[in-house]
Each structure stands twice: as structure tokens, then as C-alpha cells.
Image (cartoon, rainbow, N blue to C red):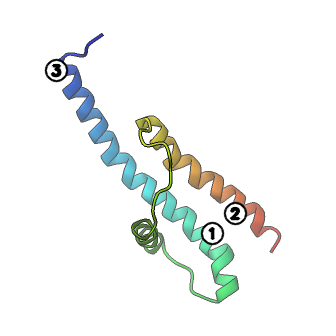
Amino acid sequence: MIDSYEEKVKKFWVLLIATIIIVPLGAIYSGFVMTYLWGWFIVPITGLNPITIVQAIGFQFFIGCMSIARDGKKDKEWGEEVAVVFIKPTVILFMGYIVSLFL
């Protein structure tokens, strides 16, 4: 079935608005996770100060700019990208918490 022009425009705007909402939420959530990981591992090992969520977000942006994505799959579905934004940090936080129990 071929979508009409109006349906394509509506789909575009829905995805655009959802992306504008989800990207900042994902960044904040990842920053939240990073502050915990930083506090559990970096502070005790190096003696550096704890970081804020804003500092963690900035640090993640910096690392993202300096690293190269090596994902072989180029065309991910939008829903898959959204899931990765929230599931990956949750799994990392859980695993980090388990590891921190052994410190």
C-alpha cells in the first residue's frame, strides 16, 4: 500500500517531534547512569571529584565526537534506536552495580 502524501508528512512530523523529545531524555538518562558509574569506579580509584549529570552528558558528547562507530548495520529501525538509548544504559548500570558490590 502506498502512503499518501499527507500520511508521509504526518509520519515525518510525528518522528521529528518524538526524536526531539527522546534524544534529550536519553542524554539525561545516560548522564545519570554515568554519574553513578563515575562515583562507583573513578572516584575511589583516582580520587577525582564526583561529576554532575550535566558534566557526564558533556563528557559523553566529547567521547562520542572522538570515537568512531563500528556498527556494521547501517539502517536501524527508529524503534530499535530508541530501545538502545534506554536499554543499553540500564543494562550497563545494572552490571556496574553488581561489579561495585565486589569493591
Q: Position of residue 67 (x, y in %)?
A: 46, 66
Relative horizontal placement of residue 19, taking residue 63 as reference (left or right): left
* Circles 1, 2 touching at the beta carbon (< 8 Å): yes
Q: Nearer the viewer, residue 4 or 55?
A: 4
Q: For the residue carrying disc 2, how many other residues have a C-alpha within 10 Å: few (<14), some (14-19), or many (20+)?
A: some
Q: Residue furthest bottom?
A: 47
Secondary element at image label 3 = helix
Residue positioned 27% across, 28% down in the render: 11
Question: For the residues carrying marks 2 and 3, which lies nearer the camera in this image?
Answer: 3
Q: Which residue matches tag 2?
A: 96
Label 2, secondary structure: give it: helix
Taking the spot 61% from the left edge, 68% from the top edge, the residue there is: 36
Residue linked to disc 3: 5
**Label 1 amino acid?**
Leu
Q: CA distance from mark 1 to mark 2?
A: 7 Å
Nearest the viewer among 81 and 87 is: 81
Q: Which mark is residue 37?
A: 1
Q: Looking at the image, is mark 3 or mark 1 earlier in the sequence?
A: 3
Amino acid type at image mark 3: Tyr
